[in-house]
């Protein structure tokens, strides 16, 4: 019963706070088979808001079948019905509920990159005109990724989503002003001394509007400005593959050296996917004190208080970034035990404390 109540509260947050559904609007609810309990609660809440729910339910196995059987022509096909939906719906609530987080791990990365290129126009329409939010519904597969039982994972997950989002919004409003006055970012830590400019870029605060859980503020590095090296303590996961022990060296904004302790070939293939894949598209700071340990799920991990993350590839236009790529791959740097973040030479993140003190109602992030 506890998890049912939590699902109902999460559904209300998604509909009322995240996408702010209004009377007469069309709200798409996208999920898989295992997301049914939360999807139905969201469906109910959309109706209560006076909006029109549109259910879009898929099968996880269909993705693997598509990549195994589709021809190059089929992979390059842009589905017009999905484009019509993107141009018609007002909001999109996306519920991830995987039964197997590795179901695409045998698919060549190039195929998936080609598919992302084909559907990129749809993604761009959705990003430009639709209010959307992405969340999880706890499943055994997600729990296994964190080496937890399902009840333990549910406790972790709902702790992360049941935050003071209004308080976080106020804290991020202050952080936004600081970031938008800054020029040079420097990250120092284990095997790391990396710098880049964010001058003239817009900082985007994220307090539950697009991701749930949320709790980050991000912007876009100036594309040619990144210099130095960085080591990522946590594995980066994409396409069902886990790449661990990543070390990157940048010169004049581009990755010039890349290595990994696990799946190095996949790392290099992703960085070579297109010209923009080896350029930084995002710099973000995590501030959700409810996320305290690595889960192998970027939805939670990039929000972890006391960490920063960088994404190679596509930047978000609303942040002022100009890098274009079919890739957008987040990698997380842990600064809680060792490392500092500087803006124009002044420390703003040290041992898990952002901008001098933890925001009201939030604990200092620790391991």
Image (cartoon, rainbow, N blue to C red):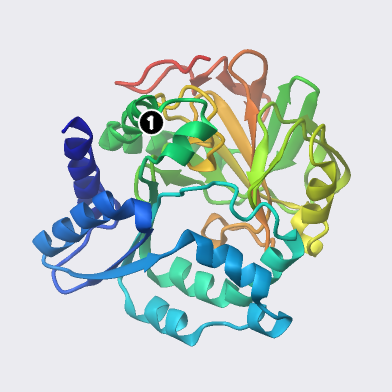
Q: Mark 1 = which residue?
A: 150
Q: Which of 71 and 358 lies nearest the eye of the viewer?
A: 71
- Quadrant, the N terminus: top left
| 42 on left or right of 181 | left
Query: In this orientation, which residue lies closer to the viewer: 195 or 106?
Result: 106
Residue 190: percent from left, percent from top: 75, 19
Crowd class of label 1 (few under 14; some 14 to 19; many from 20; radius 10 Å): some
How many marks on residues? 1
Q: Quadrant of residue 363?
A: top left
Task: Tell me if I can see residue 205 in this picture.
Answer: yes
Please give the name of the residue rendered at 79% of the width and 62% of the height, measured from the top-left corner: 273
Position of residue 173 relative to residue 354, above or below, is below
Asked if 30 appears above or below 135 in the picture, the reply is: below
* 248 is higher (above) or lower (below) than 130: above
- Residue 226 is situated, as x and y percent measured from the top left of the image, at 78, 43
Tell whether 14 sits left or right of 74: left
| Of residues 255 and 240, the one drawn nearer to the viewer in this rendering | 240
Q: In the image, what residue occupies the spot 82% across and 36% down?
A: 260
Query: Residue sitting at 47 percent across and 74 percent down?
Result: 125
**Please, what secondary structure does the residue beneath circle 1 have?**
helix
Report whether residue 253 is seen.
no
x then y, percent, for residue 351: 57, 14
* 297 sits to left or right of 281: left
Residue 84: horizontal and vertical position, in percent? 41, 84
């Amino acid at each position: 019963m506890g998890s049912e109540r939590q699902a109902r509260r999460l559904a209300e947050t998604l509909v009322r706070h995240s996408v702010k559904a209004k009377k007469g609007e069309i709200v798409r609810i996208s999920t898989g088979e295992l997301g049914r309990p939360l999807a139905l609660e969201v469906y109910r809440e959309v109706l209560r808001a006076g909006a029109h729910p549109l259910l879009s339910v898929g099968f996880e196995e269909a993705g693997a079948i598509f990549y195994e059987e589709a021809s190059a022509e089929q992979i390059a096909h842009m589905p017009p019905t999905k484009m019509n939906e993107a141009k018609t719906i007002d909001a999109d609530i996306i519920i991830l509920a995987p039964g197997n987080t590795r179901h695409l791990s045998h698919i060549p990365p190039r195929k998936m990159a080609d598919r992302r290129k084909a559907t990129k126009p749809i993604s761009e329409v959705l990003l430009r005109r639709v209010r959307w939010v992405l969340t999880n519904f706890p499943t055994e597969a997600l729990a296994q990724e964190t080496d937890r039982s399902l009840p333990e994972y549910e406790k972790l997950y709902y702790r992360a989503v049941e935050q003071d989002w209004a308080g976080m919004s106020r804290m991020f409003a202050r952080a936004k002003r600081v970031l938008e006055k800054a020029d040079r970012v420097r990250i120092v830590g284990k095997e790391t001394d990396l710098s880049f400019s964010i001058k003239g870029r817009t900082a985007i605060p994220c307090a539950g509007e697009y991701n749930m859980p949320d709790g980050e503020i991000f912007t876009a590095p100036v594309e040619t400005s990144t210099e130095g090296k960085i080591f990522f303590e946590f594995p980066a996961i994409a396409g069902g593959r886990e790449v661990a022990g990543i070390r990157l060296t940048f010169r004049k904004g581009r990755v010039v050296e890349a290595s990994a302790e696990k799946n190095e070939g996949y790392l290099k293939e992703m960085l070579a996917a297109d010209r923009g894949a080896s350029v930084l598209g995002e710099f973000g700071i995590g501030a959700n004190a409810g996320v305290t340990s690595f889960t192998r799920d970027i939805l939670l991990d990039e929000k972890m208080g006391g960490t920063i993350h960088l994404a190679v590839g596509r930047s978000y236009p609303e942040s002022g970034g100009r890098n274009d790529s079919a890739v957008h791959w987040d990698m997380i740097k842990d600064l809680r035990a060792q490392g500092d973040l500087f803006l124009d030479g002044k420390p703003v993140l040290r041992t898990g404390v952002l901008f001098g003190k933890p925001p009201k109602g939030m604990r200092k992030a620790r391991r």
